[in-house]
Image (tube, rainbow, N blue to C red):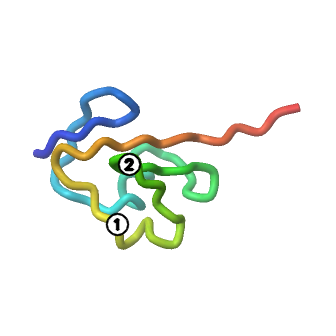
Amino acid sequence: MIEIELNGEAYSLEASIPVSRLLTELKLKPNRVAVEINRTVIPKAEYERTIINPGDHVEVINFVGGG
């Protein structure tokens, strides 16, 4: 298990995983979120290749439509 900070809260992962897998685990659609790791915005095209490591500070912002 590894520990990260997710949206300001402690969060445990089984291992270092790509951003895309974290989004799947959180049941979020990649095209509806923005992801930042350690204050760096991750382009959507990099979600498969960007690995979340122990101690990373991850922010996931979910876009919600409305009227």
- Location of residue 45 with respect to 22 vertically, above or below: below
- Image coordinates of residue 5 in percent, x first then y, are 28, 36
Q: Mark 2: which secondary structure?
A: helix
Where is residue 13, by image quadrant? top left
Position of the N terminus by quadrant: top left
Identify the residue position indicated by label 1 in the image: 50
> Circle 2: is it few (<14), some (14-19), or many (20+) Cα within 10 Å?
few
Nearest the eye: 40 or 54: 40
Give the percent coordinates (x, y) of residue 63: 66, 42
Write down the quadrant of residue 2 in the picture: top left
Give the mark, 2 or 1, whose residue is nearer the N terminus.
2
Q: Amino acid at mark 1?
A: Thr
Q: Nearer the viewer, residue 42 or 22?
A: 42
- The quarter of the displayed image where residue 40 is located: bottom left
Dot 1: element: loop
Tag shown at residue 25: 2
Q: CA distance from mark 2 to mark 1?
A: 16 Å
